[in-house]
Amino acid sequence: MRAGALFRAADAVLLLPDAPREAMRRPAVLEQPFTVARARAALHTTRRVAIPVLEHLERAGRIRRLPDDRRTVVRVDGPEAAPG
């Protein structure tokens, strides 16, 4: 991870370093706002992986969680979400 070869989305979820950028592309084309289930399907992954990735994108200011737990894309352009 220090060398940038992996992105830690959660304690037990390690992904390729471009995962946040790739994960941002797919929710951006979903009907807004979207559910975790729709994002999970668009990302072709499990809920165990999708939730930490979505939470990372929330912390990075790329998506926003609404009061009803749906999410909406806030910012697609500009610098890509960096692993954190």
Image (cartoon, rainbow, N blue to C red):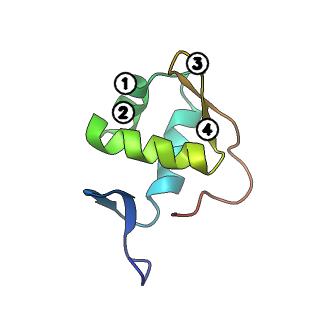
> Who's the residue at 60% across and 57% down the image?
81
Write down the residue under mark 3: 67
The residue pinned by badge 1 equals: 37
Tell me where residue 50 appears, x and y as whole percent: 36, 40
Give 14 or 27, whichever is nearer the viewer: 14
Q: Which SS class for mark 1?
A: helix
Residue under label 2, please give it.
Answer: 40
Question: Marks 2 and 1, how far apart in space?
Answer: 5 Å
Percent x, y for residue 35? 46, 22
Q: Are the residues tagged 2 and 3 within 8 Å (C-beta)?
A: no
Q: Which residue is mark 4?
A: 63
Looking at the rendered image, the quarter that the N terminus falls into is bottom left
Circle 1 Cα neighbour tier, 10 Å, few/some/many (<14 / 14–19 / ≥20) = some
Q: Earlier in the sequence, mark 2 or mark 3?
A: 2
- Residue at image coords 69%, 36%: 74
| First in residue order: circle 4 vs circle 2 | 2
Amino acid marked by disc 4:
Ile
**Location of residue 52 in the rendering, given as x and y in whole percent from the top left corner:** 40, 45
The residue tagged with tag 4: helix, strand or loop?
A: strand
Q: Rounded to the nearest whole Å, what is the CA distance between mark 4 and mark 2?
A: 15 Å
Q: What kind of residue is marked 1?
A: Ala
Q: Amino acid at mark 3?
A: Pro
Q: CA distance from mark 4 to mark 3?
A: 13 Å
Q: Answer whether labels 4 and 3 touch (C-beta < 8 Å).
A: no
Q: In front of the other: label 4 or label 2? A: 4
